[in-house]
Amino acid sequence: MGIFSNLFGPKAPELHDLSVLHTDMHSHLIPGIDDGVETVEQSIAMIKGLMAFGYRRFITTPHILPGMYNNSAASIMPGLALVRQAIAAEGLGVTIEAAGEYYYDETFEEMAKEDDLLMFGGKRILFELPNMHEPQMLRHTVFALTCRGITPVLAHVERYPYLYEKGLSDVEELVNMGVEMQVNIGTFTGIYGPQLQKAAYQMIDAGLVSYLGSDLHGEKHLGYITRALHDKKFRQVLAKHEFKNKEL
């Protein structure tokens, strides 16, 4: 057995929680401002649930979608203050910050030129794309952001098959342009379908994914994380690959 161990190298240990990530950088924990939690009590319940998985820091990211979720610092920061007060009252040893999850449309193209963007981890901005088609100006907007020293972070990249259905070259191109990719933990359970699950693993194996996120909206997403942690292949991903969550 020792001879074969030397030939193939040491086997990476399996991890059974998410403490190696330390920080969850995609969630919807501010009550009543998007399709996430509705009350401060729910916020605290979800934070306690995430703490049980090993998280100790949170960057919550309410939707910013004009016409549906008209969020800005004016709505997000007071909600963040309420959650922080509740965390302190509960004596929870965690920290929480807030940014935003921007929906890519013409409005975002204009917002990307402004100085009041809600960012995290220095100068990073989380954004999501339409599910059905790539925005025409995507690469132009990415270039404009990176020229300003801003790092675009693409939320749940696995949800956009048009970026990878013919291979990973488009994802690789965006990464080479300076985009960091995030994948939802729930995707590894197959709940969003086998195509997305397969793509998530392929992009991670290719070294294209920087972050894992809960994208927590409510209790069901805690269940998705539990299911993922019961999956041996996912546990091996946690042990084998370095993600940037803990650096934020």
Image (cartoon, rainbow, N blue to C red):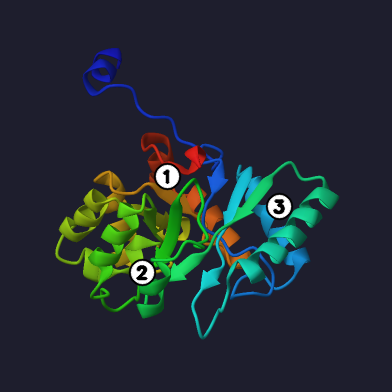
Residue displayed at 16% across by 60% down: 167
Give the SS element for disc 2.
Answer: loop
Residue 89 image offset from top left, x and y in percent: 85, 51
Reading the image, the residue beneath label 2 is 193
Q: Quick one: label 2 or label 1, which is nearer the N terminus? A: 2
Residue 72 to residue 44: above or below: below
Residue displayed at 42% across by 35% down: 239
Residue 132 to residue 99: above or below: below
Q: Quick one: label 2 or label 3, which is nearer the N terminus? A: 3
Q: Nearer the viewer, residue 129 or 51?
A: 129
**Circle 3 residues within 10 Å: few <14, some 14–19, many ≥20:** some
Q: Nearer the viewer, residue 190 or 58?
A: 58
Determine the image quadrant of residue 181: bottom left
Residue displayed at 62% across by 45% down: 57
Residue 43 image offset from top left, x and y in percent: 71, 62
Residue 182 image offset from top left, x and y in percent: 40, 55
Going by the numbered disc 2, the residue's amino acid type is Gly
Give the SS element for disc 3.
Answer: helix
Q: Marks 2 and 3, Cα distance to the nearest angstrom?
A: 28 Å
Q: Can residue 104 be seen in this view?
A: no
> Mark 2 or mark 3, which is nearer to you?
3
Q: Marks 3 and 1, Cα distance to the nearest angstrom?
A: 24 Å
Total labels drawn: 3
Is residue 60 shown left or right of residue 66?
Answer: right
Is residue 165 shown left or right of residue 36?
Answer: left
Reading the image, the residue beneath label 1 is 232
Going by the numbered disc 1, the residue's amino acid type is Lys
Reading the image, the residue beneath label 3 is 48
